[in-house]
Image: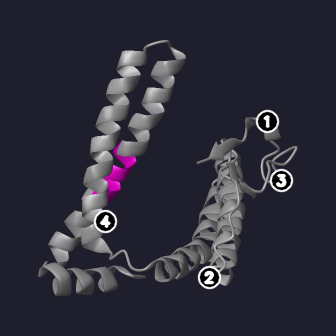
Amino acid sequence: MSGKRDQVEFMERRYGLKARTTENVHTAFVGEAKANQRLLMYAKKAEQEDLPQIAHLFRAVAAAEGVHSRRHFAMLESVADTQTNLERAFQSETAVNGVHYPEMIRTAEEEDEEATALVFSQARDVEGEHAKLYKKALDHLIAQRSTEYYLCPVCGHISEGKPPDTCPICGASGSEFETIP
């Protein structure tokens, strides 16, 4: 779904929900998804501070927030077959890379927020790579080619096959890359 009006129409057809309720579901989804990520970051910090039980609590509540966000998401958008989901993911990454991040970068630069512009630029570049990965997956959907993926924990760059010596986006060491199960 591309626009808010499309979401409202989908919600009215699927659940009989009206515009304001749809906006509330969207707001709840965003809040729960943010809480999920925030709590996972808190858990990582608690682990660094050698507080495993607190980290465990943060992860448990994060999991609950994840349940909430997925339930809200299911009311906003349908999860279709894998090919359709790949197509939607490709379109979303392409829009974020080509439209949304460039606007955010311009604003950050206009406001002399250099660090923010750099983070947005790196995210934009990584989103472009994500779109290419989705396109490649769409092209090879039937073949079901197996590959390993490695994630840069700094900028989110994904490498196929093996981690690079250094991240091409942010310069992080390849030894820091995480294997994606």
Chain-order first, disc 4 or disc 3? 4
Residue, disc 4: 73
Marking on residue 168: 3
Depth check: 179 or 165 in front?
Answer: 179
Secondary structure mainly formed by the magenta segment? helix
Q: How crowded is mark 2: few (under 14 residues within 10 Å), some or many (20 or more)?
A: few
Q: How crowded is mark 1: few (under 14 residues within 10 Å), some or many (20 or more)?
A: few
Vertical arrangement, residue 161 with respect to residue 97, above or below: above
Residue 11 in percent (x, y) is at 21, 80
Label 1 to label 2, Cα distance in Å?
33 Å
Left or right: residue 172 versus residue 37 is right
Residue, disc 2: 142
Label 4 to label 2, Cα distance in Å?
28 Å
Disc number lying in front (1 or 4): 1
Q: Is mark 1 on a helix, strand or loop?
A: helix
Please say whether residue 161 is one of the residues in the magenta stretch: no
Label 4 to label 3, Cα distance in Å?
33 Å
